[in-house]
Structures are given as structure tokens and as C-alpha cells.
Amino acid sequence: MNEDGSRRWIRPKPSHGAWWHRRRVVAYALMALFFIAPHLRLFGKPIFLMDLPHRQFTLMGYTFLPTDTLLFMFVLGSGVIGIFLLTAFFGRAWCGWACPQTVYLEFLFRPIGRWFDGGYTGSRNLDKQHAWFTPRRIGKYITFFLLSLFVSHTLLAFFVGTENLYHWVLTSPSQHPSAFFFVVVFTGIVWFNFTYFREQTCLIVCPYGRWQSALIDRQSVIVAYDATRGEPRAHGVAHRDPAAGDCIDCGACVQTCPTGIDIRNGLQMECVHCTQCIDACDDVMTRINKPTGLIRYSSQDAMAGQPRKLLRPRTVLYPLVLVVLLTSLVTALVTKAPADVTVLRGLGAPFTEEADGRIANQIRIKITNRRGTSEQYTMTVSGLAGTDLKPQDITVVAPENPLVVAGGATRLTSVFILLPRSAFTAGERHVDLVFTDGRGYAETDGYRLLGPATGGAR
Ligand code: SF4
Ligand code: SF4
């Protein structure tokens, strides 16, 4: 903020040094991945699809169904611990190199904005000095709007799939009002963010910067100013005091900072580790024939002359937790059956007595087909060995047996099991329900049928 409380508009001067070139390669690769990913398929499925209408999540060819909460928890947990581990080692590498906010702002919207604005002028208040609605500005807004539209449509494809997206784009919004509403709102948010809000998203909204004090330690990699070498700073290069440090107080590191801070004040929450100040200062050092690296990737301990320690509590604990989570995930994936069967008791009376005296139990069966192809599931009843009952004493009445379930789908059906009254002892009879799909899948679920407490006696 300015002293009067108004917004301090930040127009960072780009520093096209070695780190900027490396980040640009990563940024364009990530953008390409984002735009191409919805169209990529693995094992016939999208590599990433958060299918909200069907409550399914597909990742790298594997579809997590609503019943896969445990698996999904392992995936999410691994992701969170992975970020913790990355942060413990490399500080805010995510912010500077991979966060969509930084990637799109610094390598897409900001360069285009500079082109429309006529480049960097050094004025922090250019946005205020210029009228908001000059032809160039309007051109910028329209270009940003089209880009925002493209970004929001691509994002929607991650939730509904590209087939739906193509169809919806070519049909009236009245046929898909929710998706249309999402695109309108998200386009507005993206446009507002990159046109107006910009660095404030990192400074005010994003919680990740605030977690840093908890996630990094003194050994974590940070972008740091070497005060021992740079101080006491002395303005300019002519007539320098031999006792002065290497910082010539040129301000290049501040002018290039996209969050408007001075890295020489030490590690700050606002620093997104974008390395622009490294590039700016290296350029200055090269021009005054000093070694580069006055601002560099380092750590708080390294700056204080402490040795590097790879093994710290968090760099030991996080990998251990990660190994446990990933092992659990792989084990659960490998041992996961190709179908989920849930047997539920029927609604209403626990059992009914038929006219011929047999006892009928209604049960509800929910089958989720985890395979990608349509399957037929057959249910049989067994588990009567050691009793007087023979298989022909059991009758299964089902609207469909086998039950056809499409790939990835779930179906619920109601089934009646009829047994002679004499089959019940103390009001119940244990049976085994066996489900097979004819392709090697077989599952046996024990079930307690209910009957009259008097058993065979009337
Ligand atoms: S201080 Fe941090 S945010 Fe600012 S230019 Fe340097 S690395 Fe980037
Ligand atoms: S760019 Fe380097 S020399 Fe210039 S003010 Fe920043 S730290 Fe000092």
C-alpha cells in the first residue's frame, strides 16, 4: 500500500537472466500440459478427469469410484506430504516454478499486458496515470478475456471430459446451464485475477505463503541476499569506500520483484521465490565485474555459515510417512476386487411367510462394476452344508440374475430368498451369498436370513 492507504501498483521490470530462461521453459511446458492433458488418454481413459456428475475421479487411467474413499485418501495424503517434503527441501519452489498463478501471470498475461501497455516504463503508477479505457487498454482487456475464456473451458474439460465440452460449446447454454454458469463465473475470476488483482492473490489470498514458517526450516532452500558480502551497501560504483560491500544499492532487485518487496530485508512471507531478483542482481554484478550470486538460492543456515544437513527431523519423517502412504495405496490398488458388492437388508418387514409356508427374505444388492467393460453378475446362495437342507430347497427370485452392470457403473437390485420354515433355528439362518462375473471374479458374503423364532414348530 501507499502511505495514503491506496494500492501500490506494481509494474515489475522483467529480468531476462539465466533463471528466467529456465523458468520460462518449465512454465511453457506446464501450460502445454494443462491445455493438452484433457485430450490425453491412458488405457482408454482420460489421464485426469474429476467427473463430478458421476462422482468419479480418473487419474492416470485408474478410476476412483465413490466407494474408494480410502484409496482417494491415500492419493490425497501422498500429495500433501509430497508438497510438505518438497517445501522442506526446496522452500517455495512450487510458488516460483509451478503455481498456475505465477506461471500464467509471469509468462502469459504479464508479457501480453506489457506489449499492450507499451512495455515497462519504470513508473509504478502507470495504471493510474493512464485512462482505463484507451484503445490499447481495451485491446488488452479483450485479449485477457479471450485467454480467460480458453483457460476456463480447459478447466471445465477436467471436470466433464472433452466430449461433453465439445458438445456443450456447440449447443445452447440453456441445455447445460450449470456448466455455462461455471464458465461465466470462472472466466470472470481469471480475468479479474490477471487483469486487476495480480500479485495480491499471493499476498492476501493464498494460504500457502503463510504456511511457510511452519513448513520450512533453517536448512530449506530459499532465495536469499548475502548480507555478509553485500553490506554495508554503498550507492553507485564511483569513489567507493574500500570497506563497502558489493551491493551498490541500485534497486534493480526491488524494481524487478513481482510482489514489490526488497529481498535485502531478509526472508519475507511475500517472497514467491521467483528468482527475478537473482537475475537482476547477477546482471548488475556482471556489469560491475563482481562475482554473481549476491542474491542466490541458499538457506538461512548456509547464509549464517552453518554446514548443510540433509537429515533433519522433517526430511526423515515426511519420506517415512510418504512410503507408508504409497505402499498402502499400491497394496490397496493391487488387491482391489474388480467389483464392489454391498448387501443390504430389505425395507419393511424383516421377513414374510408365503402361502406355501416358506419364509421369504428381501435383500437389496448394490454392485459396482470396477472394470471398464459391461459385466454380468450372478448371485447364488450356498453355505447349507451340515444342515438337512438341499440346494433345491432354496429359491432365489430376482428381476435380473445375472445382473448386467455397465463398466464403472453401480446398480441396485432387490432379491427375494425363500427357504422352508424348518431352515430357521432361533429365528435365523446363516447362508453364503456368492457373486461371480464369469471372468474370474468371485466374492462370498455371509448373510443372516431372518425367520420365525419358533423355527420348524408352528
Ligand atoms: S524477493 Fe522473492 S518474489 Fe521478489 S523477486 Fe526475489 S524471489 Fe521474486
Ligand atoms: S540488485 Fe544487487 S546490487 Fe542492486 S540493490 Fe539489489 S542486491 Fe544491491
Image (cartoon, grey):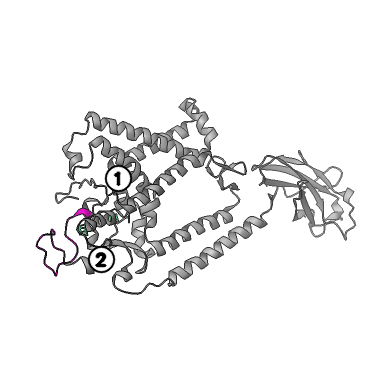
Report the residue marked by disc 1.
198
On the picture, is 32 further left or further right than 53?
left
User: In the image, is residue 159 part of the stretch drawn in magenta?
Assistant: no
On the picture, is 262 further left or further right than 55?
left
Residue 101 picture location, percent across and down = 36, 47
Residue 407 picture location, percent across and down = 66, 41
What residue is shown at x 23% (from left), y 69% (from top)? 228
**Pointer 2 or 1: first along the chain:** 1
Q: CA distance from mark 2 to mark 1?
A: 29 Å
Q: Residue furthest bottom?
A: 306
Which stretch is magenta? Answer: 233-252
Q: Vertical placement of 213 versus 412: above or below?
A: below
Q: Regarding mark 2 in the picture, which secondary structure is present there?
A: loop
Q: Vertical placement of 319 versus 61: above or below?
A: below
Answer whether residue 267 is visible to the viewer in this image: no
Q: Regarding mark 1 in the picture, which secondary structure is present there?
A: loop
Residue 110 picture location, percent across and down = 30, 42
Principal secondary structure, stretch drawn in magenta: loop
Answer whether residue 177 is visible to the viewer in this image: yes
* Mark 2 vs mark 1: in front: 2
Residue 261 vs residue 382, the one in the foreground: 261
Q: Quadrant of ligand 1?
A: bottom left
On the picture, is 256 further left or further right than 361?
left
Residue 55 vs residue 361, the one in the foreground: 55
- Kind of residue indicated by mark 1: Arg
User: In the image, is residue 235 part of the stretch drawn in magenta?
Assistant: yes
